């Protein structure tokens, strides 16, 4: 079966923008507790300043034109529209690489590393290490569709992406890389569809890949926190105790958004679909919290970039479909069968300020890890924060695998 692909340009209808500006001008803000800053969520004064900038200085058409400098396409695979960027590598034999983002990201977070992968010689690298890169808006995000029926969780994404890469773009074999949900998706990708994968590169390894409890921990009378039901009650291994303590801290301090998106997404989606400022507050608070840069986060994410990311959710009305990735995966879970792992050669780039920093022995439990690097700096958005380092890691990992391509 052929996959229909055609060039695509971002061109948001003016009436969508006009409606947005009207809503921004009519923003109604709540009160705030003085002196709380970011400790109770988004900082009130920051949001007031951001709204003013959004109305009077931000220019979507300028950002749209910049994004359109890339080669955008739209494909239809099994009745679903998939938006993606496809940039060919500059070397003599570029390797295809499928690069996946997460939530509340969009494809723009992967654009900084893109030229380092397609044209390594420009950055002091070897042109033989070049990649032809495909960056999708993952299903449900931005300009990509999501199926209307329920039950389509993260485990169902790889089949669509594999058809795009093989049937649509003609790549017999290719590599994949992901962080956040993109990293999560590498698991069913590698387990269910390994035949076309050269290798897997990931920089984020979340908890829900298998049941890690001891038999005595499975007593139905033990209370389990949402998101920790796979965790041992008292890990005996000190490294695993440290890992699960970090997971616990994440769920307690940062996980409220996730609980809501997993269990009651429709309620939240109605509010965020009606209020651009509410949507921006919901998303930008996480970009600041997860990047690890504190009040300097706009040095990492310029204000225009922050707003453009929010705009990609707003102008496509895709917040509700994006967070369905949480609820469909929660109500229709998938995990690796006990004792099995992904045998595709895998690389792990571990960063200390990840939400739950990766522990090597845990990665090796689930993946055939043949390349592993612990980096001294960097966090959840490492692919944007430290793109030179990530690009070098990707080149190093895939270099010996290219001979099998």
Image (cartoon, helix red, strand yellow):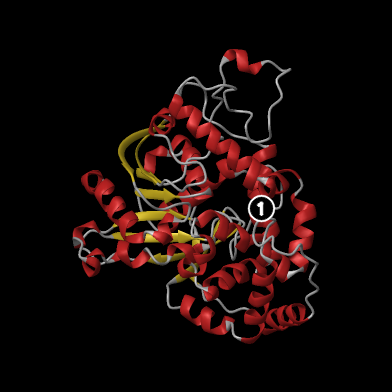
In the image, residue 144 lies at what x, y percent? 58, 61
In the image, residue 37 lies at what x, y percent? 66, 62
Visible in this render: residue 277? yes
Q: From this viewpoint, which residue is outermost toward the front?
A: 35
Residue lying at 47% horizontally and 63% vertically, measured from the top left? 109
Q: Nearer the viewer, residue 127 or 78?
A: 127
Q: From this viewpoint, which residue is outermost toward the bottom?
A: 56
Q: Is residue 189 left or right of residue 149?
A: left
In the image, residue 246 lies at what x, y percent? 53, 38
Visible in this render: residue 152? no
Above/below status of 183 relative to 287: above
Above/below status of 310 relative to 161: below
The residue under label 1 is: 323
In the image, residue 239 lies at what x, y percent? 43, 29
Q: Is residue 249 left or right of residue 367?
A: right
Q: Is residue 144 left or right of residue 400?
A: right
Residue lying at 47% horizontally and 28% vertically, measured from the top left? 240
Above/below status of 392 relative to 234: below
Per the image, label 1 sits on a secondary structure element best described as helix
């Amino acid at each position: 079966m052929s996959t229909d692909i055609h060039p695509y340009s971002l061109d948001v209808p003016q009436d969508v923008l006009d409606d947005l500006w009207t809503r921004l001008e009519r923003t109604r803000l709540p009160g705030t507790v003085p002196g709380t800053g970011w400790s109770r969520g988004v900082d009130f004064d920051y949001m007031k300043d951001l709204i003013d900038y959004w109305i009077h200085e931000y220019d979507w058409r300028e950002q749209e034109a910049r994004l359109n400098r890339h080669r955008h396409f739209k494909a239809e695979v099994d009745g679903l529209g998939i938006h993606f960027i496809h940039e060919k590598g500059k070397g003599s034999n570029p390797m295809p690489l499928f690069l996946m983002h997460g939530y509340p990201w969009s494809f723009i977070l992967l654009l900084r590393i893109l030229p380092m992968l397609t044209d390594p010689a420009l950055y002091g690298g070897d042109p033989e290490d070049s990649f032809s890169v495909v960056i999708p808006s993952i299903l449900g995000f931005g300009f990509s569709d999501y199926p209307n029926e329920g039950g389509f969780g993260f485990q169902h994404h790889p089949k669509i992406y594999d058809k795009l890469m093989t049937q649509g773009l003609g790549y017999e074999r290719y590599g994949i890389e992901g962080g956040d949900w993109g990293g999560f998706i590498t698991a069913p990708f590698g387990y269910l569809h390994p035949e076309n994968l050269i290798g897997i590169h990931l920089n984020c390894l979340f908890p829900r890949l298998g049941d890690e409890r001891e038999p005595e921990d499975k007593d139905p009378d033990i209370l389990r926190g949402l998101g920790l039901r796979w965790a041992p009650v008292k890990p005996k291994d000190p490294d695993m105790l440290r890992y699960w303590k970090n997971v616990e801290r994440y769920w307690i301090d940062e996980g409220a958004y996730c609980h809501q998106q997993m269990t009651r997404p429709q309620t939240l989606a109605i509010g965020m679909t009606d209020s651009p400022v509410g949507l921006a507050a919901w998303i930008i608070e996480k970009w600041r919290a997860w990047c690890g840069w504190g009040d300097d986060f706009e040095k990492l994410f310029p204000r225009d970039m922050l707003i453009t990311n929010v705009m990609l959710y707003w102008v496509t009305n895709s917040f509700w479909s994006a967070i369905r990735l949480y609820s469909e995966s929660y109500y229709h879970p998938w995990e690796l069968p006990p004792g099995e792992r992904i045998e595709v050669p895998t690389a792990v780039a571990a960063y200390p300020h990840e939400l739950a920093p990766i522990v090597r022995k845990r990665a090796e439990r689930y993946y055939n890890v043949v390349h592993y690097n612990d980096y001294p700096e960097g966090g959840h958005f490492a692919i944007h924060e430290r793109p030179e380092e990530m690009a070098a890691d990707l080149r190093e990992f895939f270099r010996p695998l290219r001979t099998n391509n």
